[in-house]
Image (cartoon, rainbow, N blue to C red):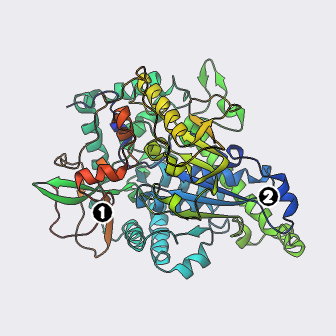
Amino acid sequence: MTTPAGSGKGFGSVSWWGLSPALDLQAESPPVDPDFQADTVHSTPELDVLLLGSVDGRHLLRTLSRAKLWPRRRFNFFVLENNLEAVARHMLIFSLALEDLEKMGLQERSETFLEVWGNALLRPPVAAFVRTQADLLAHLVPEPDRLEEQLPWLSLGALKFRERDALEAVFRFWAGGEKGPEAFPMSRLWDSRLRHYLGSRYDARRGVSDWDLHMKLHDRGAQVIHTQEFRRWRDTGVAFELRDSSAYHVPNRTLASGRLLSYRGERVAARGYWGDIATGPFVAFGIEADDESLLRTSNGQPVKTAGEITQHNVTELLREVAAWGRARASRGDPEEQQRSEASPEPGTSAPTPESFTVHFLPLNSAETLHHKSCYNGRFQLLYVACGMVHLLSPELGACVAPGGNLIVELARYLVDVRQEQLQGFNTQVGERAQAAGFAPQTRARPSETFARFCKSQDSALGSTDPAVEPGTPSLDVLAQPLEASSPAPEGLTQPLQGGTSHWEPCQLPSESPGSLSEVLAQPQGALALSNCESDSKTGVDPTPRYPLSPTSKVRL
């Protein structure tokens, strides 16, 4: 069976990388109030940002790297994801980006970043780094005091205890809690997922990838993605081949996630790869650049590939983050500034704990944040990824301060969604933003990648979604994602073994708030249906946690 075009299934039910270029969140937020700056001599203005489904931390790192261009400000990033594996990847990527330059050089750091972030297979040295760092994080998560001491920029205080336990289990799996490649046979899982997605087109997969690249991604503005690198990623999952191809053979366990499936009438937990197999990780850092020479063309062809642009951008981003950290650490302390200028200390290579904090919020808490006074009307900027648009509601809008901004990622680079479906999706984004109390920014530059709104001063909680106009294209023709009640396709999953006593996070794909195909697949009138109502119909907790059972098996 071939997956219908326009189904959105290539996006998967779990997001590992974004479908839009990295943003400087300071440029998207309202300007600092000059009166506040004048009245607070000993205080630093704060920027509070709420991000839903940002996935890979690209916006946060971009903001930190460009902070030197703006007046001094303290950042509070509140990150809400739909699965704990994404939270764990956030922590791993940030700990890598903020690693001491004395411990890991800039080139090694950027190459490790790219492989962990976007490759299905790793080189042995990179896999060893992941195991070491994951083991460290697994020991820090259950010990708040040690965590605050070693990672002062990180806050897990809002997570529930069971979520912290599951987060620790994720890190222990990454650290090699289950030995051997069969614990997560990435190459076989990738190929099985590709076969299931392409169906009868599998034998012509190179032609399919060329069509998707030239007729969709290139037409939508990603001309720098080269045919060879896109084919390689579609075939093997390796997007950034920085060494010989034979060096990449260790499965990237950070791309594993749990999922509940029904097998012979019983629900079993299975581990597999449920992420993107259609677009790839090239869009986040590879199609835009501050250095315009990287986007130059010769005879109508780009002179640089998306992989080369990504490597350059990530290297410069990590360089700027390290340089900004040294500057912030020494500012305000003349003796420290003289010491750092004479001989920079290793401990000042990363941003100081006073400069920013990343707060991780509980899963599925978007609809209840406004009930807490500490979040109600707090945020100057709200970012919503395209896979989380169904969470945009008046309740969520109540968390944004009057005059605050809203940025919504559009589905421009989702290759298996048709153009008319993209237009319908954009229309629904505008309707949901209006219902949440936002209005389009009048001075915002036109963009097909992001929709920009500002908070209306007279917005009120409890407004309802407007009726859908008859002329809006219907999206109910989209196929639903693979339901949890269907048997697991052969070779598509790996059973969770019972050799460990830790709990694993598992989530039903049909109830995953991060599935863009769900948002697009619903009829427009049904988009106002809340997750709680959907869950009540199925009778299943949207984020169940199950102990690993030795009897849980799935046919491979």
Above/below status of 378 relative to 287: below
Q: Amino acid at mark 1?
A: Pro
Horizontally, residue 255 falls left or right of residue 290, namely: left
User: From where the camera sits, is residue 54 visible?
Assistant: no
Above/below status of 331 relative to 366: below
What secondary structure is found at the residue carrying circle 2? Answer: loop
Structural distance between the alpha carbons of marks 2 and 1? 42 Å
User: From where the camera sits, is residue 263 visible?
Assistant: yes
Horizontally, residue 40 falls left or right of residue 185, namely: right
Residue 271 versus residue 476: which sits nearer the camera? Answer: 476
Above/below status of 500 relative to 99: below
What secondary structure is found at the residue carrying circle 1? Answer: loop
- Mark earlier in primary sequence (2, 1): 2
Query: Which residue in the protein does label 2 denote?
Result: 72
* Position of the N terminus by quadrant: top left
Query: Which residue in the protein does label 1 denote?
Result: 544
Question: Which label number is shown at residue 291?
Answer: none
Q: Amino acid at mark 2?
A: Arg
